[in-house]
Image (spheres, rainbow, N blue to C red):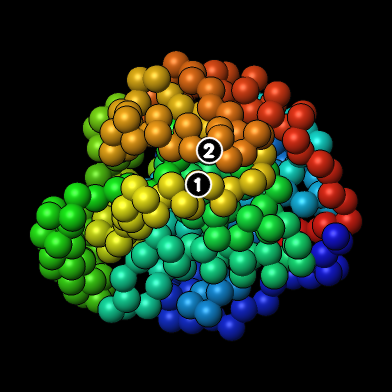
Amino acid sequence: MASKQARAVQINPTASQQDDEESRRAISNVEHHPLIRFIELQDKQNGVTEVQIPVPYGSIAGKWFGPKNVRPILCLHGWLDNSGTFDRLIPLLPPDVSFLAIDLPGHGYSSRIPDGMSYFQVDCIPLILRIMREYGWSKVSLMAHSMGAVIMFIFAALFPDKVDLLIGLDALKPLSFYPDRFPERMHKQVLKFIQADLRNQEKSEPPSYTYEEMMDRLYEGTAASVSRETCPYLLQRNIKPSRKFPGKYYFDRDNRMKYNVISGWSDDVNAELGKRITAPFLTVKATDSPYPGSKEGFDQMVDILKKANAKYEVVYVPGSHHVHLTEPEHVVPVVVDFLRRYWQKEVDVVSKL
């Protein structure tokens, strides 16, 4: 189904967007680190177009790869990452396939939700529907990593008629929490969220570091899942230059995201969700990455999906949790094979630039 004609996205600026715009202007006047310029150059070489999609609290930012007249595969990143997580994978995939990698709310260049509000993973379900409506898509194809793959799983189970292709990278289903541990966990999360929300409202600049120190912090924060060489791809949309200390940067993501409310249902509910997914579905599991929850839970869901969906498959590849970013050559052949079998080109769909 063709979308409505492309048009420039005009959004009435919210306070959050005005702050973003002021920060962008400040950044434009700063001499960037060479690695920031390097990522900018790569985006130009890959024909990437920046996209903004209006939402009530501002806009969702994204990067469009590939032809503008082809409905793209919508790409969702992991927790505390951003659309840059796909920068090394997508350019190696078939050039006739389009991709729209978005920054989820509170991440990258996307707007934050209003002060006082909490982030819920399930809030991204209506976000996908909003993006579909904005572009006039009757169906959506999804490729997602980690937290994004969990969101994808939930969406595909709740709206199986709206999904035609699924690619999950190193995650599969919502976590299952032990009932006796969940209340205490949520108790702590709420208290930490309140502290982060109050810090946000102070509007003070977070601690700043040199670019090299930023790379070290990201590398260590991911337990070396992201290599130092690939840190710049995530830092690109995750940091801003300090206004207080020239030559230094600070993390710009919304700290409330550290304490987002994770979808956690019982194993029985997850099983019912899995049985509802009917679209062609590929899971790529990195062998050097821990299993979210447990290997037993992962294997049980794989069995459920295989019994319910003849077009479900799981492939294991060597690499870390961010293998698609650090060693995309391990992921590319698997994804290309899957796309060749199940992706169908839908033309006359144009991005709103």
**Residue 92, percent across and down?**
66, 27
Q: Mark 1 and mark 2: span between their CA atoms?
A: 6 Å
Q: Do the CB atoms of the residues marked 1 and 2 lie less than 8 Å apart?
A: yes
Residue 68 in view: yes
Quarter residue 171 falls in: top left
Residue 132 as seen in the image, left or right of residue 344: left
Residue ID for mark 1 = 274
In the rendered image of this protein, does residue 40 appear above or below residue 268? above
Kindly identify which numbered label has been placed on residue 305. 2
**Residue 167, percent across and down?**
59, 38
- Image quadrant where one finds the C terminus: bottom right
Residue at 47 percent of width and 33 percent of height: 302
Residue at 48 percent of width and 52 percent of height: 273
Q: Secondary structure at mark 2?
A: helix
Q: Secondary structure at mark 1?
A: helix
Residue at 47 percent of width and 52 percent of height: 272
Residue 210 as seen in the image, left or right of residue 308: left
Q: Residues within 10 Å of mark 1 (few under 14, many from 20)?
A: many
Residue at 66 percent of width and 34 percent of height: 311
